Image (tube, helix red, strand yellow):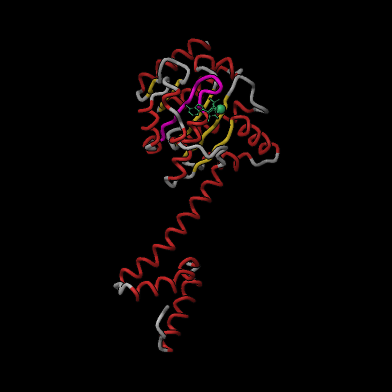
């Protein structure tokens, strides 16, 4: 229990509480009596007591921001990298995935592509990396290719094209799940290309697909769009082929060049 305090001290306490409420430091306003009692009891220095008090608000603000980033990100599952069983999927290079999980790839606006048949953990890895980015304080948005195409199509009909493009340009990390063989709704391939193109060299994109890179031209219907999209995506990218013999890391212009030539040779 607190000792009885002189009137002026009580008024000061009320004022301090009012200041905290006025500044919307509500967690601090609530914690104030507790922190003051503790401070008296433990004979804390003024600095320690103030640090204790502000730490409470900082932690509460951090938690609120995290939950708001998480809501915005629209992650379909609560998966983290800890849920991924690397032993069950020896085709996946754990070192590469853990390197991606450091999020250094965000600093260079590099991309990550997960390519493989259904059920091998592509979505799980995309979600886990997206979650790591949310936890690290980044703005992240998770969507499927079909949903992205549908959103863009609707926006185009409603005259909101520029605003939907700004929306998809915004996140530091955009994860696009399930790019498949089925044609995207509306003018989906072109919308997807524009999204990829405007993010190119600016911010990172994760893409999961069951379409092998060599088959992209066919899957998109439009070989030129497919080649242009691969060009942007692979320029700086880690490509994880999950069913394949191993991943390949395209960090170098030369490697990307080879793919571009391959694609261009196929489409011409
Ligand atoms: P994909 O996107 O390649 O079709 P998912 O990521 O959706 O595959 O994985 C399918 C299911 O299998 C999910 O429930 C996922 O949690 C699980 N799963 C796949 N690979 C692994 C793994 N290596 N470790 C743990 N769970 C896995
Ligand atoms: Mg999937």
Indicate the position of residue 91 as horizontal and vertical percent values: 42, 19
Q: Is residue 218 left or right of residue 252?
A: right
Q: Residue at x 46, y 58 (%)?
A: 61
Along the line of sight, which residue is nearer the eye, 201 or 138?
138
Please count the marks in the image.
Answer: 0
Residue extent of the magenta highlight:
109-122
Horizontal relation, residue 74 to residue 51: left or right? right
Residue 86 position within the rendered picture, expressed as x and y whole percent measured from the top left? 42, 26
Q: Position of residue 161 (x, y in %)?
A: 62, 39
Residue 204, quarter of the rendered image: top left
**Viewed as shown, does residue 5 lie left or right of 175?**
left
Asked if the magenta segment contains residue 28, the reply would be no
Q: Can you give x and y, in whole percent of width and height, for residue 70 in the image?
A: 52, 46
Q: Is 112 in the magenta? A: yes
Residue projecting furthest to the front: 1
Name above or below for residue 268 compared with residue 237. Answer: above
Residue at the bottom extreme, as displayed: 7
Q: Is residue 227 above or below residue 203?
A: above
């Amino acid at each position: 229990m607190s000792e009885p305090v002189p009137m002026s001290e009580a008024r000061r306490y009320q004022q301090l509480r009012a200041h905290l409420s006025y500044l919307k430091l509500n967690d601090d306003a609530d914690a104030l009596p507790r922190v003051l009692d503790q401070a008296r009891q433990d004979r804390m220095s003024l600095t320690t007591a103030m640090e204790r008090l502000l730490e409470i608000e900082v932690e509460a603000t951090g938690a609120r921001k995290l939950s708001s980033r998480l809501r915005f990100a629209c992650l379909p599952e609560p998966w983290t990298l800890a849920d991924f069983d690397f032993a069950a999927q020896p085709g996946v290079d754990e070192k590469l995935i853990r390197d991606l999980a450091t999020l250094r790839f965000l600093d260079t606006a590099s991309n990550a592509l997960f390519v493989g048949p259904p059920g091998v953990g592509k979505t799980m890895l995309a979600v886990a990396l997206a979650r790591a980015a949310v936890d690290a304080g980044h703005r992240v948005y998770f969507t499927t290719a079909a949903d992205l195409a549908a959103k863009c199509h609707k926006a185009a009909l409603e005259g909101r094209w520029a605003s939907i493009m700004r929306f998809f340009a915004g996140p530091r990390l955009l994860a696009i799940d399930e790019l498949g063989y089925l044609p995207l709704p509306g003018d989906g391939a072109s919308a997807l290309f524009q999204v990829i193109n405007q993010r190119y060299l600016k911010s990172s994109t994760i893409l999961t697909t069951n379409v092998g890179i060599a088959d992209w031209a066919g899957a998109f219907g439009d070989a030129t769009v497919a080649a242009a999209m691969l060009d942007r995506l692979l320029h700086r990218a880690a490509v994880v082929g999950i069913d394949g013999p191993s991943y390949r890391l395209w960090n170098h212009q030369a490697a990307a060049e080879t793919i571009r030539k391959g694609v261009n040779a196929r489409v011409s």
